[in-house]
Amino acid sequence: MFYVEHFYGHKNGKTQKFSTEQFFLRFISQSAHRQITLAEGKLAAIFRHVHECIPQICLGNAQRSGIAPIPFVRYSTCQPMQKTLAVVNQKGGVGKTTTAINLATAFALEGLQCLLIDCDPQANTTGGLGFQRDADRHSVYDLLLGNATAEEIALETGLERLRLIPSSKHLIGANIELVPSKDRAFRLKNAIQGVRQTYDWIVLDCPPALDLLTLNALVAADSLLIPMQAEYFALEGVSELVSTLERVRDSIHPDLVIEGVVLTMYDERTNLAQQVTENLRNFFGEKLLKTTIPRNIRVAEAPSHGMPVQVYDARSRGAESYMELAREILHRNHVESPREKERKAAAARHQAANKETKVRFWPYT
Ligand SMILES: Nc1ncnc2c1ncn2[C@@H]1O[C@H](COP(=O)(O)OP(=O)(O)O)[C@@H](O)[C@H]1O
Ligand SMILES: [Mg+2]
């Protein structure tokens, strides 16, 4: 996957640099692709979508509008789509750790490179993936204090494309030790800068508090995933979380957005769950994700075996819903994972094969 940052065009004998936005609006939108622009309004996303046909579109439309691209579109910056997602909610027991482990696993199973970072001193993500809580091993603590790099610390997990930066109990101290430091909120962001391009997704599991560790995660993240339980007090604390988000946006990180709100341990049969879901939909609008994670015993059992639920019992409802959640998030980001491409190709082959083997009976019509 690539995104195009800007183009070079040749107009009135001069070479000009156009941003993708200018380029799209001035040249491509004159074509049949106009409706895509109008419908979506998200240029970056569209460009990721159509990046393969950009040279042709560009040449055709640019020539028609009197612009001669030189010699054709140049991808000035081609980078893989990368996103850092913080799983955050200051309430404990809402399913942050479970979501971080199983969502990161789902991304890896979809064929994407994923790094999971355990930012919680309780180290449940670390334990849930089968690692001992070893205080002597390098951890996020060393990352925050600059004792080691992310590349050195990242551990291989049982899954091919999933790596973990573990936590340790030393992390409790970081909350206090970092206070005198001027860049205390930027430590994690700076520490993972070097590995951002190595991974398609970086998932951060946050502690159940709005402390300095969570602040580091918010500053390092591009977007937030908020797991919530559909219970009577669900919205309690959300306003605090949202106002923290706004403060971070105003002061440090204006691009921080909510990726989505996911309902965990969900039981759709109860009236209460439906009522609370309605309230959350009114509050969060389209940010409330369609996928819900049901209460599922296999999800609860998996960490005690040191496995993500997809490895422990791939056919359980819990495993399937986490795969569904990953696909929904990828879809919203206009990312087509390697597995999705394979599924589409297989469906196309299947369709073609069906056409070929169509049996015709006499008399042919
Ligand atoms: N979908 C689910 N079905 C059943 N139990 C779940 C589910 N999600 C989480 N749990 C259980 O709920 C508890 C709290 O989840 P956890 O992910 O540790 O929350 P947090 O990280 O927000 O504190 C854990 O014991 C976990 O196994
Ligand atoms: Mg947790």
Image (cartoon, helix red, strand yellow):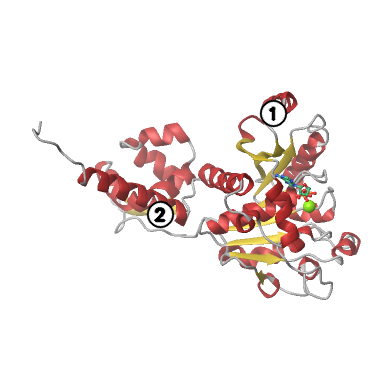
The disc labelled 2 sits on which kind of residue?
Glu
* Residue at image coords 83%, 46%: 92
* Residue at image coords 51%, 44%: 331
Q: Is residue 330 left or right of residue 251?
A: left
Q: Indicate whether 184 appears above or below 63.
A: below
* Label 2, residues with CA under 10 Å away: few <14, some 14-19, many ≥20: few
Quadrant the N terminus occupies: bottom left
The disc labelled 1 sits on which kind of residue?
Thr
Residue 219 lies, in percent from the top left, at 73, 53
Front one among 321 and 50: 321
Q: Is mark 1 within 8 Å of ligand 1?
A: no
Residue 152 lies, in percent from the top left, at 68, 75
Front one among 166 and 36: 166
Q: Is residue 30 left or right of residue 281?
A: left
Q: Is residue 60 visible to the viewer in this orientation of the structure? A: no
Q: Is residue 8 left or right of residue 146?
A: left
Q: Indicate whether 321 appears above or below 159.
A: above
The answer for how far apart the CA atoms under marks 2 and 1 are is 34 Å
Quadrant the C terminus occupies: top left
Of the numbered discs 2 and 1, the one sitting upstream in the chain is 1
Residue 353 lies, in percent from the top left, at 26, 48
- Mark 1 = which residue? 277
Q: Secondary structure at mark 2?
A: helix
Residue 219's label in the rendered image is none
- Mark 2 = which residue? 342
